[in-house]
Amino acid sequence: MMKRRTAGSLLCLCALTATAASTAAQTASPYAGEERRVVKALSAKEVDDLVQGRGMGLAKSAELNHYPGPSHSLDLAQDLSLTAEQRRGLEASMARMSAKAKQIGAEILALEGELDAAFAGRTINPAGLAELTARLGAGQGTLRRVHLEAHLETAALLTPEQIARYDALRGYSEIKAPSKHSGHAVKH
């Protein structure tokens, strides 16, 4: 009888402990700790990417459809057998993109800071929210366009063979390469 009570008590205790642990786990937000960020909505990596003008995956529509980017093309210069003229063109495209992206990234960070400060100071209102988020959306759209334009410029500088080689080197070999009649608007 004593063994039965002890076993029952242990079972009950285990169930209570599991329930308490489950409740504690459910109350912790996945955002826990992020309240200490300078810009609450952005990770340190996202802030650094914006400051440095990095792509952050904004040009995947181009990258995965046979429009290489200038940075990776320059990284693969030897494997792609880039000419001196192609290198110069890619370097110029990269410089333009980087300068614009850094400028826009700084603007986005400033707007994110304004949005964060308005919420932190409890001064946000519907009109201010609409204006800030519209400006943020426009900035993010412009940043994406800048990165996509660089991919257009890059594709115009490379031959179809170099683009196919780029795709293979980047691990996109399963992607069907465009034919001359597929509507791929690359100019050479």
Image: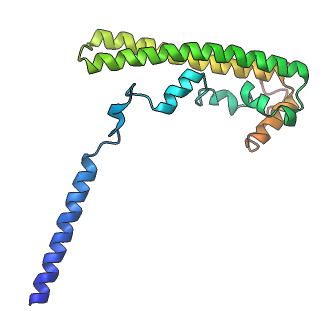
**Percent x, y of residue 112:** 41, 19
Image quadrant in which you'd find residue 28: top left
Query: Is 51 situated above or below 132?
Result: below
- Using the rendered image of the protein, determine whether residue 22 is visible from the camera's viewpoint: yes
User: For the point 53% across and 18% down, which residue is it?
Assistant: 105
Instruction: Report the residue that reaches farthest toward the bottom.
Output: 1
Which image quarter holds the C terminus? top right
Q: Which of 179 and 146 is in front in this view?
A: 146
Q: Which of 180 and 45 is in front in this view?
A: 45
Image quadrant in which you'd find residue 71: top right
User: For the point 16% across and 70% down, which residue is it?
Assistant: 13
- Using the rendered image of the protein, determine whether residue 185 is visible from the camera's viewpoint: no
**Percent x, y of residue 40:** 37, 28
**Percent x, y of residue 2:** 9, 88
Q: How many numbered discs, if any? A: 0
Way the structure is coloured:
rainbow
User: For the point 84% across and 22% down, which residue is it?
Assistant: 87
Which image quarter holds the N terminus? bottom left
User: For the point 49% across and 26% down, which residue is it?
Assistant: 47
Query: Is 175 situated above or below 160?
Result: below
**Percent x, y of residue 157:** 83, 20
Image quadrant in which you'd find residue 103: top right
115 lies left or right of 184: left
9 lies left or right of 140: left
Query: Is 50 situated above or below 78?
Result: above
